[in-house]
Structure formats: structure tokens, C-alpha cells
Image (spheres, grey):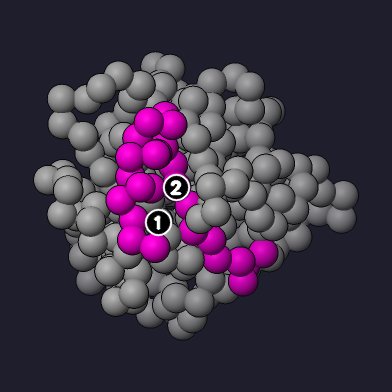
Amino acid sequence: MDAIEILREASNRIYKNVKDLAGTDDAAGDFGVGAGGDISRNIDIVAEKTVLDYLKEINFECIVLGEECGRVELSENPKGFVIMDAIDGSANAVRGVPFFCSSLAFATENKLSSITDGVITNLSNGEMYWASKNKGAFFNNKQIKVHKKNPIYKIIGINTSGSSIELMNKLHPIFENHDHTRHFGANALEMAMFARGLMDIFIDLRGKIRIQDIAAGYVIVKEAGGMLLDADLKPLDSDLSYDTRVSFIAAANQEILDEIMSQINK
Ligand code: IPD
Ligand code: CA
């Protein structure tokens, strides 16, 4: 089975196992601090276990890098890494806000740029975004592209959760100049929606986002024709380590990138 088929099946199994759990008291159960540094909730653990059980069931020879479970070596001869944020948007999932997803990616080396496959499933309705390197990006079975035309409403995705006052001051002109700034609380799903053309740019300059949260989005955005840059406007790349935190900008084209970047206070 190809990596993409494995990730798609694992995502479907997560959806099946958590769809009735979100928003319930049972979703919130506290399992202590996970590898990614946040408290692991029961819904996170159920979703991760679903993936780990499935990968073991099919003997997929890989190293799993999970946000809660950390590094799990499922083989002595791994074919690569499965980068797993089984629930992205955990706070939404626990509260029952219908905006959370699973994010699963496969990389051949310890590098973001070696990701070959990614799947993001909207766990509030089962819709799936997926891509394989050089094969395009898809929403369910339809190929997707970032929004290239001049939009009727320009939608600026911008994650400012937990931002410092310094960063808010830098970003302030963007909020002042645009009526339609958005952040929904699950970076992976927001990257997927950007790739589908629902937003024109998505920015996270907090320097806080983990690799697990963006790994699947990385290949989906690229295959949908989006630009993916770091805070210095260089092509986004990094290792896959737990400690790594990044900033990134996903832009539909150079024009919107230049427009938004010119509005950031130095
Ligand atoms: C969180 C979401 C959220 C972002 C946080 C992440 P998690 O992921 O992606 O949008 O603002 O920084 O931690 O913890 O729910 O997997
Ligand atoms: Ca998570």
C-alpha cells in the first residue's frame, strides 16, 4: 500500500473513533503533558492510539513522531517518518467547537522538505484534504488549487493566539487595513482551507507552531500551488524535531504576499 493510502485509512479510522467524543466530558480526560508540551486530553490519546494500532496492524515500517506519544519506532528498518498530530485544534475538540482535524504526513528523511504525502481530515464532518508530491492536492476527490484570481472578499488568515504585545504591534496595520481577518483554532485545517482557495494568505509569525501541526499542510499547500515561506521569506524548511518551532506564511501569489508583508511594522 502507498503511504497516502495508509494515511487516508488512518485518518478515516480517527474520524470514526472520535466523531461522537468531541464536546463530551469524556473528551477532556487529562493524561498529563505530552511530547509536544501541552496536556494530552483523552480525545488526543484515543486518536493517536487509533493510528498507532493501525500502523502496527499493517506492519508499516516507520518511525512515528506524534504530538502526544513522541517518537515511536515501529521498525528497525524504517521506510520513513509518520508525523502525527492526531487532533489539531484540541481545545475546539474538547469544547465541541466544530473546527478540529487530524494531520498525518509521511517524510522520507528528518526534514520538512522531504515530506511526500499528507492528509488532513476535518473531524467535524469527515471531509478529507490530501496530497502526494508531484501528484496534486485534493479535497475529497476533487483537485484543489489556491485562489489565484482577485477575490470578491480578501480573507486574511492570521494566527495571533498567545501573541506578545510586540508581535501584535507589528501586525496591527494588517488588522486595521483588512475587514476580513480570521483565525479558527486549528492551523492544519486552516492551511488545508487556504490550499482549497478559501483564504488568500495564512500567516503564523508567533514562532510557536510545532512541526506536527504543519507537516501535512506543507505538502497540501505546495501541491495546490501555494507559496510557503519562513519569517525571512525563504522557502520554509526545518528538521522534524519536537523542540522545533517555526513561523510561516502561506500565500496564494506574490502580489498578496507583497501587499501583506509591506503592511507589517518593522
Ligand atoms: C494548536 C492549533 C492552534 C494553534 C496552536 C496549536 P493543537 O494545535 O494548531 O491553531 O494556535 O499553537 O498548538 O495543540 O490543538 O494540536
Ligand atoms: Ca494536537
Residue sitting at the far bottom: 32
Check if mark 2's residue and mark 1's residue have beta carbons within 8 Å: yes
Asked if the magenta segment contains residue 198, the reply would be no
| Residue type at numbered disc 2 | Ile
Q: What stretch is highlighted in magenta?
A: 241-266
Q: Position of residue 194 (x, y in %)?
A: 35, 36
Residue 212 appears anywhere in the view:
no
Which residue has dot 1 on it? Answer: 204
Disc 2, ligand 1: is the CB inside 8 Å? Answer: no
Q: Which of marks 2 and 1 is nearer the N terminus?
A: 1
Q: Is residue 222 left or right of residue 133?
A: left
The disc placed on residue 249 is 2
Q: Where is residue 200 in the image (x, y as percent from the top left)?
A: 31, 34
Residue 175 appears anywhere in the view:
yes
Q: Position of residue 249 (x, y in %)?
A: 44, 47
Foreground pick, 135 / 86? 135
Picture residue at 34% right of the left edge, 69% below the top: 167
Q: In this view, does 25 lie to the left or right of 245?
A: left
Disc 1, ligand 1: is the CB inside 8 Å? Answer: yes
